[in-house]
Image (cartoon, coloured by chain):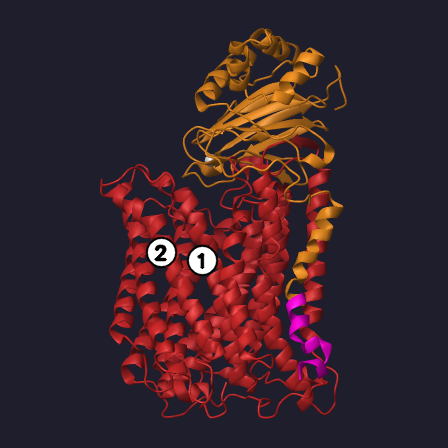
Chain colours: A red, B orange
Amino acid sequence: MSDTMPSLTDRIAALPGCDKTLARVLFGSALLALLLGLGFGWLTALGRAGVTGFEPLLAARLLTLHGVTVFFYWLYLAQAALLLVLAGAEQNCGGLALRPLAWVGCVLMLAGFAVSEISSIIGTPLLYDGGPALGRDDPAAVGWFSLGYLLLGAGLAVSSVSVIATVLSRPNSGTSEPLSAVGFALFAWAGFLIVSAIASVNAFLPSVLWALGLGAFPANQPTEWHILFHNLHYLPLMATVVVWYVLVQALTGVSSMHGSRFSKIVFASYLLFVPPTSLYHMFLEPNLAEGVRVVGSLLSLFVAVPTVMAFLIIVSSLEAHGRSHSSSGGFSWVRALPWKNPVMSAIACSALNLALGMTFAFVLIQEKVAPLLSDTFFVPGYFHFFAVGTVSLSFLAAMMVVLPALTGTLPWRPSLLNRMPALISVGLLIFGAAGIAAGFVGVPRRTFDISYGGDAPALWHTLMSAVGIGGTVFAIGLTVLVIGVARSLFQKIGDVTNQQPEVSWGNTPARASAAAWVGPLGVLVMVLAMAVFTVVAFELMNALPLIVIGGSGGHSH
Amino acid sequence: MSENRHFTTRRSFITGMGFGAVGLYGVWAAYGAAPLPFSTHHEGLHDGHGEPAEAVGHEGMVHGARLGMTPETFRREHAAFVDKFKRPDGSVEPGPQAAIAHDMSNHLMMGDDTATHDMSDHGMGPHEMSHMSHDSGTDQPVDLYLLAFMWGYNPDTLRLRTGVRYRLRMMADDITHGASLQLGTASRIIRLRPDIVSEQIITFTKPGNVLIYCTVYCGPGHDRMQGKIIVTGSEPGGQS
Ligand SMILES: [Cu+2]
């Protein structure tokens, strides 16, 4: 990015007032969704731990509300808010293009939020995928629930059009390229959102039509959901690496040393690597042929390529610049990073949690072990490393930079907030370790009372209690962090911009001889951990006193 | 510029490391779980009933014959199965001899068109049919039928023996369920879609009680959806 460009916070502070208002509404709604969804999730975790004996319908309702609120409304309202602000900042002082569309998008998304919450509270609980089979006797619940997602999708699509128009509206001054790496990333991200919104129409419009008596029962919904859902969990991950890219630059002045073209290729490669890798969600489908499972498994090995490459671009650039600025050599550059800044802590923890999440995601992509782990608590056990530890922490880190600049306030209690990413990660580690272990021993994913009249192993209860403890720990840390971040939306202190500790390593280019070991070593450790846990899964599988030939997952001995 | 750089900061190195997780393939291969994609019988997602009764090629077992059991046939065979083998205590205990007799009476005539049609109705692939004609059916698996419904299994208790090959056919009656087997240390998870017949050949190697439980949320009764397999040693007065 050009040296003549003002800092990110200055560019955000210079946004037109109406864009700032829009951003505040969206960030505020996103944080509200996070707090609500976290509350539902905490109650769910207590229910799973056996602390509270919710009756089955209430338990399913809490689980539905948790998934709907955090996965759909927190993660997607936050993405819309970040996209709009970053696009506005990228355009540098003119503000958003097609501004009315951005506002229409906001209204649609908030309407969707209200409809989804109310229908989840009142109607038959459908879980967050809104499967119509569970609501066959309650078409109204299916219809309203699906309408909520359609409104969200429409709002995201409309907002994304404004984002794309904004980043394309003016060539980035000072470079010969029409788009900076960040501008291009925002463009790809918004485009991916529009594609997903179209997939959501395929998944949910037939349900609305059925509820209105205008269409047949949407028997195909589970398949359409799988296609949508696969996109939906790589979008936040792509958003996360874009956020890292922007934040590391804001925090240290370092942008990619590999050229913006390389970054653009990596961001664009999400569109290449994500769609063909969706089959691993379907390994247990009884009508999926073994050949398809094998191919799906092989393709899934490539699903992390863009994320790992983006991680390496960022970390290697940071390390090479850090080593060039550090006098004492070795890894002392790590200590020189601005660790007193909660944004730095959040990014670092989020990178560690990403590695943990990927480690276990890659155990699950092996189709032969799917019959051991799919539909067990292994799945929520590992995906919270992504959803909470990686994506939510990164989005909150971005908000710690963006919101004070947006409202002209000081960040609230940075030294307190600085401890939260570590606390959240410790909670997640307990939750994830216990949950993954519970999955390995067969605890089902969505069953609250796992006693089975005394027939279930005693270990199941012990592990699920630990899940409840871990969930409580990270819920506390996350609540404090959200409250701290949200204070910047309201607290008026005066015209102060972010004064958090930063370093400026970007002023001089990195020494050519500077090495960058942290990224590749991290990847190596992660791949070794994948191998270890894959071996564990195979060994457990092969030790079962059952020989199976045919059916899901082939055979085992 | 790029050539003078330390190799860890070169684009080619970063690209290569980006593919690092592909190295996991080595572990898969070590467990015989990484055949070349085209070495196995390859068919697309089909919306037919049932699935290939196959084991992947590398051990040279039965190749992907697609089963054609319809939900109607499943329901009929399931009812006959429960009716035939039900014990006074409500559990179902299929006897191997009886099962073979049952199979033989249905499929005694080989070669004529009607019989072949009947065969495919019973989900037999061409390999198994030839197998049967050569070996006179002596090591045919014993058929089991398990129907999952809101909220339970029919039969809810099965009495089986170790060392016996069972052809376990399962189907969900109403909405999607699981029929997962808790086998002590871990479980074997199965997802059952309504009106799609799943089939596996299973052999228990140890006696014990196996909990069958549902792993797909299926409504307010999901938590209490369970069944049981009581596995005893195959010899009279056997291993347990
Ligand atoms: Cu069920």
Badges 2 and 1, same chain: yes
Residue A427 in sight in this render:
no
Q: Is mark 1 within 8 Å of ligand 1?
A: no
Image coordinates for residue A187, horizontal then vertical, percent: 42, 71
Image coordinates for residue A260, horizontal then vertical, percent: 53, 78
For the image, the number of numbered tags is 2
Report the residue marked by disc 1: A232
- What amino acid is labelled 2 in the image? Ile
Quarter-of-image position of residue A309: bottom right
Out of A474 and B75, give the one closest to the viewer. B75
Q: What's the residue at 57%, 52% (across, down)?
A: A465
Q: Are marks 2 and 1 in contact (CB under 8 Å)?
A: no
Q: What's the residue at 41%, 39% (across, down)?
A: B219
Out of A470 and A294, give the one closest to the viewer. A294
**Circle 2 SS class:** helix
As drawn, the residue found furthest toward the front would be A176
- What amino acid is labelled 1 in the image? Leu
In the rendered structure, does residue A371 fall within the stretch colored magenta?
no
Label 1 packing within 10 angstroms: few (<14), some (14-19), many (20+): many
Q: Is residue B112 above or below residue A241?
A: above
Q: Is mark 2 within 8 Å of ligand 1?
A: no
Out of A391 and B222, give the one closest to the viewer. A391
Side of B165 relative to B88 (left or right) = right
Quadrant the C terminus of chain A occupies: top right
Residue A198 numbered tag: 2
Give, as a single range, the part of the protein colored magenta.
B1-16
Q: CA distance from mark 2 to mark 1?
A: 12 Å
Q: Chain of mark 2?
A: A
**Circle 1 SS class:** helix
Residue A339 in sight in this render:
yes
